Amino acid sequence: MNLQPKKSNSNVALTPEDEQKMIIEVRDTIKKQKSLEKIKQHRPDEFSRFCSDESISRYLRARNWNVKKAVKMLESSLIWRMNYKPEEIRWEHVAAEAETGKIYRSSFTDKKGRVVLVMRPKFQNSKSTKSQIKYLVYCMENAIQNLPSDQEQMIWLIDFHGFNLSNISINSTKETANILQNQYPERLGLAILYNPPKFFEPFYKMVKPFLEPKTANKVKFVYADDPNTKGIMDNLFCMDELESAFGGKDEEYFDIKKYAEKMIEDDAKRIAFHSGEKCSEPNVDSNSNSKKGTS
């Protein structure tokens, strides 16, 4: 086992004791912020959840273990949650955005058990950036809800089949990056761009400056006819479970009716959780043993 202390991007060696001290410092500082009095009073459970060691660690990692920057980031995130109320978004609020299958939580996970969000830009069915972001936030909340207890990150698997530049905009891409990086730090494990066309590369060069270096390093281009990049899929997924569109053997397809049923079930669990009612944890095993939203 490697017991050497980790290093932050500032080249400062951090021991577990150092990290714990920083976590405590962030928590103590956050609790004193007057800007967060409202969320502490009206949503004490959520405030406590975001002040857990695991949560604060994500914010510290996102800011390279800079306590001051992590405090600012967490404070902004809590204020955003208080105003945006992501936990109150329900399936019926986003069903119109979801009906084409442009984003959905897959029935399969990666080999580590991490939740996979499948994205298909060609099925973009909305011109409203506000509505697109609302659905993205709903999907992020649902993915986190279904993560196994030993994982805190998800996989984005983006299928570029049939893609053209009219499917996306710089504005919506910028807002997506903002939500992912600032409101869900360290929740993305990898973003796999599968078979992007050559004309996508100039667009990516334009939007890459919106990505923080840590996020950009998680973006992987994979091409079905390139053995080198195809190996990423082999290492990450069980081919028997992976959708055939991504080189796997699973021929089943997205079914909006079944997916809607599953999302409504998940909403009920989330409502119960946020209401403080006794509710069983999401059945993590079913991620890999049953087909959610497929037929």
Image (cartoon, helix red, strand yellow):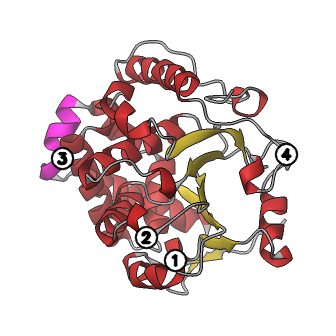
| Residue plotted at (67% across, 47% down) | 114
* Element at label 4: loop
* Element at label 1: helix
Give the amino acid at mark 3.
Answer: Leu
| Residue plotted at (77% across, 49% down) | 244
Q: Where is mark 4, residue-wise? A: 249
Nearer the observer, disc 4 or disc 2?
2
Q: Cβ–Cβ below 8 Å for labels 1 and 2?
A: yes
Which quadrant holds residue 45?
top left
Query: Considering only vertical position in the picture, is 27 above or below 139?
Result: below
Q: Residue furthest top?
A: 278
Q: Where is mark 3, residue-wise? A: 36
Rounded to the nearest angstrom, the CA distance separating label 4 from label 3 is 49 Å
Disc number placed over residue 131 in the picture, else none: none
Q: Where is mark 2, residue-wise? A: 165
Q: Earlier in the sequence, mark 4 or mark 3?
A: 3
Q: Position of residue 104 (x, y in %)?
A: 54, 41
Rounded to the nearest angstrom, the CA distance separating label 4 from label 2 is 29 Å
Q: Where is mark 1, residue-wise? A: 200
Give the amino acid at mark 2.
Answer: Leu
Q: Earlier in the sequence, mark 1 or mark 2?
A: 2
| Residue plotted at (65% across, 73% down) | 221
* Element at label 3: helix
Quick one: label 4, few (<14), some, or many (20+) residues within 10 Å?
some
